[in-house]
Image (cartoon, helix red, strand yellow):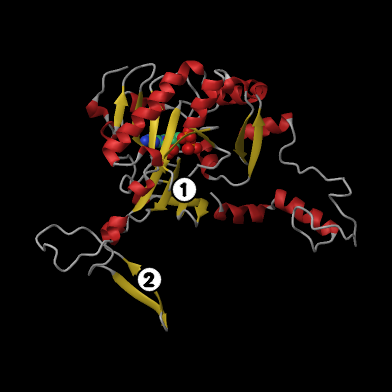
Amino acid sequence: MSEPVESSEVKSPSYDLSKFRLKRILTNNSVRKSISLLGTFPDLGTEDAIVVFEKNAYRESDVATESPSEDSESPKKPSYFSADLKVDTEFVNNIYGSFQVVPSRDLCGVKSTVIYPATEKHIEKYSVCQKYLIRETPDLYQKITLPYLTSSQFSLEWVYNILEHKQEKERIVFEDKDPETGFILLPDLKWDGRNIETLYLLGIVHKHDIKSLRDLNGSHLDLLRNLRQSSKDAILKRYGVNPNQLRMYFHYQPSFYHLHVHINPVRNDAPGIWCEKSHMLDTVINNLELMPDYYQRATLPFVLYEGNKLLDLYEHEQPIRVVPVLTDDKEQPEKGSTDAEPADGFSDDEQEERQCKRIKLATPEPKEVEATVQACA
Ligand code: M7G
C-alpha cells in the first residue's frame, strides 16, 4: 500500500456548482424528493455533468423547542420553531390550516452529488426506468456477465483513493489494515452525514481480487465475519447505534466491482435495499458456511435496466423485453366467457383490449417512457 500523501487530497472541486447549465432532467423522484440532472459547466467546456439534488431527511433535534426556563446563555441550536421561520398561510378552514414555511438557512440544506465529467455509463445509471429481471446461472455469468464487466465497468479510482488514504481520509470511521481480512469503514456518498436516522456507511475490503458476491467462497469467511463484527463495534462506538438495528448487505450486481458492504439502520428504507438487488451479509456468511462454493454454483437473479448494454447481450441469449403471447384458453377467456377475473385484473375489458393493455404495460410508448422517467428512480 502506498504511503498517504495528505497534501494531494482534493478539497475543492474544479467547477462552480452555481454555473451548472441544464440539458435535461434524467429522473425526478417525488417520493425520495430527489432530482437528477444532466448538463454542463459551460465555463469549463462541453463535457457532461450530472447533478443530483436530494432534500435532507428531518433530524429529530431540529424540531426541538426551547423551554422558557432554559439557559439563555447557551448557544442556540437551529430549530424550525424560532423567529427565523417564515410562514405563508395558504388557507385556514375550521380546525385545519395549510401553510408554506421557510425555516432558517441552517435547516434548508439540499444534499447535492456531482459527477463531472460524467460518462455515458453514468448517464445510463441515473436515467434508470424500465427494469428487467435476469436469472444468471454460473454459465451465463462466465459467458455474458463476466466478459462484459471486465471490458466495461465504472472506474474504481475512487475506491483505491480511499484504500490508499488519498481521498476521504478524514471521513474514515474505522480501519483494519490486514491485507486479507481488513477493510475501511466510512460514510457512503449518499449520506448527508448529519442524520443518524439515515446513517449510511460502506465497508470497503482491502483485498483487491473480489469483484462481487459471485467471487466469494469459504476462504473469505474470516474476512466477512470481521467485516460484520468490527463494523458493528465501530458503529456502536461512534454513533451509538444498536448492532441489532443495522442492515448489512451486498448489491448484486453492484455498480463498482470491488467488494464493499452497505450498512444502514433497518428502520430506514435506504435506496437500493430491494430484495432483487440486496443480499444480507448474514445470509451470505451462512450460505458459505453451509456450502463453500455456494456463489459459484447458485443462480443469482439481478436487475438490468433499459439502456444498459448488458441487457442487449442477454437479449441475444433469451427473450427478455418481449412479452410472451398467452395461448392457453384458460388464460385468455373468450368474449362473453364467465371465467373468473384474470390474474392481470383487467376483468371488464374485451380480450383485444386486454391484450393491448398487456403490451402497453410491457412496452411503453416513447412519450410514456418520458413520463415514467419523471416518476421513477
Ligand atoms: P454499489 O452497490 O456498487 O452501487 O455501491 P450502487 O450505486 O448501485 O448502490 C457503491 C456505493 O458506493 C454506493 O452506495 C455509492 O453511493 C457509494 N459511492 C460511490 N462513489 C463514487 C463514492 C465515493 O466517491 N465515496 C464514497 N464514500 N462513496 C461512494
Quadrant assignment for ligand 1: top left
Q: Which of labels 2 and 1 is toward the front?
A: 1
Going from the N terminus, do you reach mark 2 or mark 1 first? 2
Give the side of residue 276 with respect to residue 261, left or right. right
Q: Look at 36% across and 21% down and name the residue there.
A: 182
* Residue that numbered label 1 is attached to: 269
- Residue 260 seen in this snapshot: yes
Give the side of residue 99 with respect to residue 359, left or right. left
Instruction: Give the quarter of the image for residue 186.
Output: top left
Callout 2 crowding tier (Cα within 10 Å): few <14, some 14–19, many ≥20: few
Q: Look at 32% across and 17% down and name the residue there.
A: 1
Q: Is mark 2 within 8 Å of ligand 1?
A: no
* Count of numbered marks: 2
- The answer to whether residue 77 is above or below residue 238 is below
- Residue 166 seen in this snapshot: no
Q: Look at 66% across and 24% down and name the residue there.
A: 140
Q: Position of residue 310 (x, y in %)?
A: 62, 32
Instruction: Give the quarter of the image for residue 179.
Output: top left
Q: Position of residue 22 (x, y in %)?
A: 46, 52
Give the side of residue 219 with respect to residue 102, left or right. right
* Residue that numbered label 2 is attached to: 100
Q: Position of residue 208 (x, y in %)?
A: 43, 19
Of helix, strand and loop, which one carries label 1? loop
Q: Amino acid at mark 2?
A: Gln
Q: Amino acid at mark 1?
A: Asp
Q: Look at 35% across and 33% down and name the residue there.
A: 232
Callout 1 crowding tier (Cα within 10 Å): few <14, some 14–19, many ≥20: few
Q: Position of residue 161 (x, y in %)?
A: 35, 27
Of helix, strand and loop, which one carries label 2? strand
Camera-nearest residue between 90 and 80? 80
Give the side of residue 279 with respect to residue 343, left or right. left
Camera-nearest residue between 295 and 6? 295
